[in-house]
Image: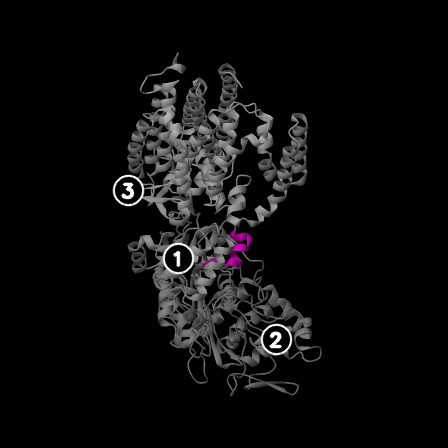
Amino acid sequence: MIDRLRIPGVGDPVLLALVLLMTGLGIAMIYSAGQVDVQSLATGIWVRQLYWFGVAIVALAAASRFSLRFLEWLAPWAYGVTVLLLVLVFFVGTGPNGSWLELGPGRLQPAEVAKLGTILMLARVMGGAQGPYERLLEFWKPGVITLIPFVLVLLQPDLGSAMIFGALFLAVLFWSGVPLPKIFLLASPGLSLLLGFNWIAWGLGFLIVAACLYVHRLFILEAVAVLLANVFAGALTLRLWDSLADYQRNRLLVFLDPEIDPLGAGWHLIQSKVAIGSGGLIGAGFANGPQKRLAFLPEQHTDFIFSVVGEEFGFIGVLLFLVLFAFLLWRVLQVASSMDDGFGSLIAFCLFAVLLTHIVVNLGMAVGMMPVTGLPLPLLSYGGSFLLVLYAGFGIVQRVAWEA
Amino acid sequence: MKSDNEHRAIRKQRGRWAAGAIFFCLSVVAAGFINLQIFSTELYTLLSSENRLRTISVPAPRGTIYDRYGRVIADNVPGYDVSMLPGPRDSISAGLDRLAERLDLSPARRAALLSRNRERPGEALVVRENANFEQVAFIEERRPRFRRVVVDQRPRRRYPAGSAVAHMIGYVGEISPEELARSEYAGYESGQSIGKTGLEQQYEHRLAGRNGIRYAEVNALGTVVRDLGLAQAQAPVPGEDLHLGIDLDLQMYADSVFPEGMRGGVVALDPHTGEVLLLYSHPTFDPNAFIGGIPLDLWNSLREHPDQPLLDRVSNASYPPGSTWKLVMSAIGMKTTDLTIDTYHTHACSGSLTYYTRRFRCWLSGGHGRLNLSEAIKHSCNVWFYQAGQRIGLDPLLAGVGEFGFGRTTGIDLPSERPGVFPDSRQWYDEELGPGAWTEAVVWNLSIGQGENAQTLLAMAQFYAALGTGGAPVRPHLVRDEMLAQQRVDWTLDLPDIQRRQLVDALARVVNEPGGTAYGSRLARWTLAGKTGTAQNPHGEPHSWFVGFAPAWDPRIVVAAIVEHGHPDGAPSLAVPLASGIVDRHLETLGLPPEATPGIRPVEALTAPAGG
């Protein structure tokens, strides 16, 4: 059966082929993103991505050489180093948000590396967890493990990447078999933070949380803590909102109506929709997208790489990529499902969660369904650190597949 | 503690949920793409085009204007327009700063351009029409600095005969915001040239043609990436040509012989059709100076010059007609009273005539003695015409003048024409001067073309043309056009032909008989008939008039000329030789065979009893 095909020493050959294929397509799209009629940073940058690809392949091969037990031992060290790097960027960071570290020939984004470190640490802590998860307090370890990088990344400030750590926390609980209502209760303060804009919406959410608490009969102190956290989050919403700068608010709001800031944050969304929409069914052809060529499409080699796909290959091309992504996600999920070892299985599922979140948030942004958060599209967007981290992750997943 | 089996079961279940999540999430995203790429693709394709395509107007060449012999009066030569594509105001403003020095943009012009950009932010902004070659080269050599700037080839108006045709042809200039708002200029764009005066204005909609459109592809910075040319766009439709009845040679001749340093005008018509052969006003200006925006100081000096070079003295200025009016009086007298060509009045001319206590003078202080109408015309005797006016009476005079079209426009195809002045009733006097502040003596003044009487050259030419041909009065027109030539005005001479011919004979004597007031300017080959005039005016020396036609018995040209203050006491009247020279030249151009015996000839009809 193809979905259980395993080759010792390699792991899942289908997954490996898929990763290489999509990286190749990604580099082709980055090449196309550089084919513009004006001077652009993106021109020729595909060569750099090719170079990163070479490094990433090595990382993948190396990662797949480590046994799971060794990785489990390594996890706290890896986690510790990544947290250290996240702290370090506050002092020696470069780049637009000061979120990069200069590292010899290239630059490293510690926020990306931290995803891998956190995944390892979460998997080690939760890999042996047996349940039955009666108290919320049982989740303090994964909670703290994700909260530290979450806060550090949020302070950079990089809301998009910070969200990934939140997603990892929920993913770990989900895969460990924690009952969904408990996950919901843990996540509920975050929900209240969103609903806090409207007290009626917040009130309804609060009632649902209360009902959930009544049905699942938590310990009284925890129940009170959850309720208080929801009240606090709801009350905090507007204060937080007021403390944001205009451009930050606009970035969060433009997906509702790009016209509120048509030349600023809305510009990205409008131009992305125009590029995708004008692609129609079959698109303008490889390297020919006029919106991209004439520089109307911003960040065409990073955040909005998929708008180039949409403009140049049309809906047919988009559908092909969506199928490839679905297939990739499914293969990773298969590895997680087929692994009995808790540590290995959790690593695979966490990688799955990171991929899914990135894909949905990035594509949702490209079609204007979600805020502009600046999460790159896995394997397609230009960016060395993310590619390197993904490949290391795939390397470990291959090891998991091989050991399963 | 859970067993491995339990764990497997949980992962199997959660794995299914996660697979469901893949399907659900990607389906939602796919729905977003379907919405954009399948259902809304037309909208976004359009937006994409709007993003990158800028329409640039392609000006249509204005129609060429020819004279009656096909010589060019107005045509087009290639010129360059510098415009800026729409964009953020800051960048337009910065672009103007960069262009300002090279394109001679004054601060006022710069402010005007910016305010136009505010009003019509989506339109290309024409910064300078008719830029010269150095300016265009300057921009093209520094392309990266002038990203939004487009240089267009645009036909530029040219008037080869320049100042000789200025008042008739008018000039073109950039459409003003006020004009742009008017319905007659619907579809015009800012920066476009329109006819401002003269024929350019009168026939704007025939001359203008229709502008075309072409597309330029720009990038996100507004830089023109490529010019898509006229493909898939609209080609301009050139304007219609105009063929005038004007004889350019005659026009140039008038320009060259008009008395130096004097003001005035001259107009000549074909008396049978009303085609204008010549329309010249002096001093004049060069209409070419207006092309591409006239420099402010030149404009001010033209406007404020005491000689008013911009004024068209043919259609837009009225003068007391002086003695040229005496033919109007004669015709009214013959129509409304028993006045004939042979009428002698009670009082012979003794140099003046007294109305109660007021003495009215004749120009010849020694007096003309006893005269009949024919001799009174020949010698231009005022005393005779005072009595003629008295005989006609005020009310019939006022009515009769109106019946000859005076006080109304002639209907020439020029936008600037203004009617002359003549009282239409006693009420006019009551209103203008006040009841009781005037007497019947106004008739006397009116009778010799003075007083409350001011006429345009055109109106006088029109009347003399009717007198000369005996046909229905024509409507003067510049553009040769069957319809206009057939058109007649709303009045007729309504004079028995015998009497008309007697008046023509009298006019012929003015020029061709020794002692006639224009004898010095008679023609060697043809009989010129006409009347001199010396119009008193409050501004200085009398104006010099001449209105006449030739050949007297089959006129081919009627001419009216005035030289302001051109008849000082004791000096020759300047308008007469000017007019006779024009007539002579025109008849020669026509190739008209010389008359065997030009001058006065006995006419059977003249001896027949008048009024019969």
Residue placed under numbered mark 3 in the picture: A105
Q: Secondary structure at mark 2?
A: helix
Q: Secondary structure at mark 1?
A: helix
Mark 2 neighbour density, 10 Å: few (under 14) some (14–19) many (20 or more): many
Chain designation of label 3: A
Amino acid at the residue labelled 1: Gly
How many marks on residues? 3
Please state the horizontal and vertical placement of residue B583, each as a whole percent of the image. Answer: 39, 67
Q: Which mark is residue B95?
A: 1
Q: Are marks 1 and 3 on the same chain?
A: no
Report the magenta residues as a range: B174-185
Quarter placement of the N terminus of chain A:
top left
Mark 1 and mark 3: Cα distance apart in space: 41 Å
Q: Residue at x 47, y 36 (%)?
A: A273
Q: Mark 2 or mark 1: which comes first in sequence?
A: 1
- Judge whether A159 appears above or below A121 on screen: below
Mark 3 and mark 2: Cα distance apart in space: 113 Å
Residue placed under numbered mark 2 in the picture: B389
Which numbered disc, 1 or 3, marks the residue closer to the eye?
3
